[in-house]
Amino acid sequence: MLLGDAGTLGTLRIVASVDVDTSTNGIDLVRIDLEQKLWLTEISVAGFPIPGLDGLFAAFLRNNVKLIPLVPFPVDHATSTTTAMKNADVLIVDDTSPADKDASAFLVTFGGGSPATSRRSPRASSPGAATGGSSRRWVGSAGSSAR
């Protein structure tokens, strides 16, 4: 995130996992997990890092903000009805090619039949999926999962 006009005041960078919390009956909650899965914070002011500020900011996010809810999906994990949502998932694509076609997607599995593969999802944003990376929750896993 740029602070000020075109970043003239500084920059803020946060790297954290997006996951799906399935612990509430009837809801799959896509969220950013800052409490358990905050991997990096970087702050610079006018282009200069301030020693110790990154750690203080990370501690504030972990201890006070903790989670940022994104999208709740009403689901029935036991359904076999083809018109009812059974599971929600999220896919993040980091395209490192020069085209830089980063993407995110919310995926929903409906009851009945067998789930489709989400391996093809990155191809829409990363030609050939050769230069991109993605992470996803495996079908059938319980609880929260890293992305």
Image (tube, rainbow, N blue to C red):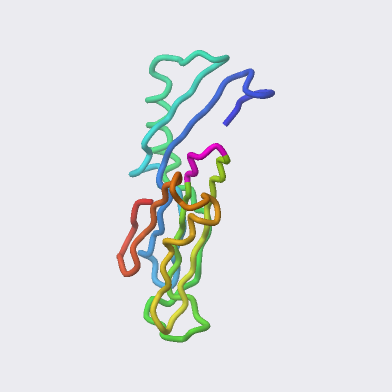
Q: How many marks?
A: 0
Rendered position, 82 above or below 66: below
Please tell me which residue lies in front, 51 or 39: 39
Residue 86 percent coordinates (x, y): 43, 75
Q: Is residue 109 magenta?
A: no
Q: Quadrant of residue 143?
A: bottom left
Q: Quadrant of residue 16?
A: top left
Q: Residue at x 46, y 61 (%)?
A: 120
Residue furthest out toward the right: 5
Residue 70 percent coordinates (x, y): 52, 54
Residue furthest out toward the bottom: 81
Q: Residue at x 66, y 23 (%)?
A: 4
Q: Which residues are magenta?
A: 94-98
For residue 66, side relative to residue 83 (left or right)? left
State the predominant SS element of the stretch in magenta: loop
Please tell me which residue lies in front, 104 or 50: 104
Rendered position, 39 above or below 52: below
